[in-house]
Each structure stands twice: as structure tokens, then as C-alpha cells.
Amino acid sequence: MKHLTLIIVVSTLVLSCQKNIEIDENRLFIKGGIKSGLVISKVKDNRFKKDNKSFPLLYSIIEKARLKINGEGISTTYNYGEEEHFLNKKAFEYKSELYFNIKNDFYEWTLEKPTSNKTYEKLPINLEKEHWYIIHNITFRGSNSYLRFYINKNGEFEYDDLKYVMVSPI
């Protein structure tokens, strides 16, 4: 009986543990919710010796799209520099999952490179194989963080967990 209890407890813990961030060709998941201002950039590796094992520190941005929360009944305020959204005067519930190829209620994209004034219901950047990407401006547990990922030739997404932007207090 002790073993059965142990198996149930361990199984529950393993199944309830989810990464802080997950991404594939269809969706982005961020534990705690996806907030406005998130930016996805497709980058070009400008290194002489190309390597898909490490992020290129020498790169240029090919395309860049910014996510924003907008729609009927949405209002925005700033509290100590932090953007807060409300839906019909109630706190907005940020979604943990955002889909790239279908419309997400109250979420829309703008293309920043190349510059466009148009808004998009779906991610306006094609996620292509053998390219590096960066997701900036991820608010996670009150801190600014980012994710670098690579899509290999098999279409698999290779990435680590979130990395935090370190700011000096000076």
C-alpha cells in the first residue's frame, strides 16, 4: 500500500510540473499568462562559421512582430511603469496559451520590421526551419525575461528555459 501511495504522489507531481515556457509551430505557452508588449524576432546569423548549437551573438533582425492586447471593452493603465489591462473595468485574465495560426481573442500583432501600421490576428512572421528566433519582453514572475530558440531542419524547436534580463541597480 505504501508503494501505491508513493507512485500516486510522484505521478501527480510529475504530471503537474510544466515548463515555464513551451513553444512549437502552433502555439506559445507561458506559465502565468502572456502580456502585451511581447516581441518575436527572426534573426539572421551573421557569423562566419554558422552553428545551430549556440545563439549567434553577431546577428541582424530580419522580421519583428509585437503582440498587443486590444479590443472592445479593453482599457489600459500603468502602475509603477507596469502595464495593466482591464476588460469592462475588471482585471483582464491573461491567457497562458497563444496560438500563432488562429485568432486569439483580445490579442493582436503588429509588424515592426518591416514597418507596417496594419494589425494582424495571426502571427505575421513565418516560423521557418534552420532559423534562430528571440522572444523579448516576456513578463514572468514580475521580471523581464526572454527566450532564444532554433528550429532545426526537422522542424523541431530547440530551446532552454526563460532567461532573465539582469539590470544593475546603479
Image (cartoon, rainbow, N blue to C red):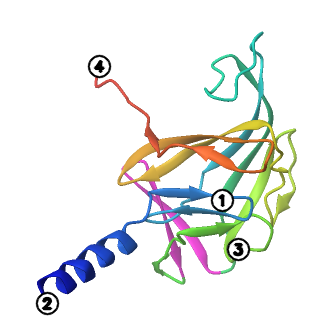
Q: Which numbered disc, 2 or 4, marks the residue closer to the eye?
A: 2
Look at label 4 and name its amino acid: Ile
Tell me if 25 is positioned left or right of 18 in this view. right
Q: Is residue 137 placed above or below 97 in the rendered structure?
A: above
Residue 77 in the image: x percent, y percent?
48, 62
Look at label 1 and name its amino acid: Lys
Q: What segment carries the magenta color?
A: 73-87
Determine the image quadrant of residue 133. top right
Residue contact at pointers 1 and 3, CB within 8 angstroms: no
Q: Quadrant of the N terminus?
A: bottom left
Query: Residue visible at 42% across and 48% down?
Result: 81
Q: Secondary structure at mark 3?
A: loop
For label 2, the residue is: 1
For label 3, the residue is: 104
Residue 170 tag number: 4
Outermost residue, left side: 2
> Which of the pair 169/161 is nearer the observer?
161
Outermost residue, top side: 48
Residue 160 in the image: x percent, y percent?
51, 43
Residue 3 in the image: x percent, y percent?
17, 81
Q: CA distance from mark 2 to mark 4?
A: 58 Å
Q: Which numbered disc, 1 or 3, marks the residue closer to the eye?
A: 3
Of callouts 1 and 3, which one flags the residue occurring earlier in the amino acid sequence? 1
Q: Secondary structure at mark 4?
A: loop
Q: Secondary structure at mark 2?
A: loop
Residue contact at pointers 2 and 4, CB within 8 angstroms: no
